[in-house]
Image (cartoon, helix red, strand yellow):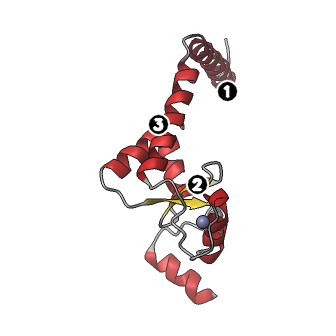
Amino acid sequence: MMSPKERKKYNADYYKRNRKLRKQISKSWKEKSGYYKKMNEQRKADRKAIFSVLGGKCVNPFNLPHPDWCNDKRCLQIDHVNGNGPKDRKKYKEKYGMFAYYTYILNKIKDGSKEYQLLCANCNWIKRFVQKEHRVHVKQPIFKTKSEKLQEITEK
Ligand SMILES: [Zn+2]
């Protein structure tokens, strides 16, 4: 007989082992059936479609000179107008996984969303610094109540 503690550990180990195995089985099935390939093709097609609905070139928010090479699709990036990218991606990934993210964006744009725009890599980096978006991924302290937040502010 196992003690309750041993039993608990055994169960946890079993679950872990099993989870790995389940993942392996599902992965190999996906490889065999061409699931990954299909998804990657879907991703590429969606990305292309997003680029074309968004105008196919940088929206040039800072009025910089944009020679043709700036609008090479290899340096264009889909940008969140209000800088919610990391949050949006995280939320989406938790819910659906990463493969259909472009489909999700494309559908949103088709439904009239104005949340996305195309930026060239230059403008995107400038925007990040101007709007301090490069700090978005830094974890913000979570305040439970309004008074906690107030306390934090007044302490500073
Ligand atoms: Zn640009």
Residue that mark 2 sits on: 77
Which residue type does callout 2 highlight?
Gln
Q: Nearer the viewer, residue 24 or 35?
A: 35
First of labels 2, 1 by sequence position: 1
| Disc 1 crowd, CA 10 A, few/some/many (<14, 14-19, 20+) | few
Which residue type does callout 1 highlight?
Lys
Q: Looking at the rendered structure, which numbered label has been put on residue 96? A: 3
Report the residue at 68% width, 16% height from top: 2
Instruction: Write down the quadrant of residue 122 in the picture.
Output: bottom right
Q: Position of residue 23 (x, y in %)?
A: 61, 20
Residue that mark 1 sits on: 5
Q: Is residue 103 above or below residue 85?
A: above
Q: Position of residue 18 (x, y in %)?
A: 62, 17
Q: Position of residue 73 (x, y in %)?
A: 60, 49
Residue 36 in the figure: left or right of residue 114: right
Q: Position of residue 34 (x, y in %)?
A: 56, 15
Residue 17 in the figure: left or right of residue 149: right
Report the residue at 44% width, 76% height from top: 146
Residue 41 in the figure: left or right of residue 72: left
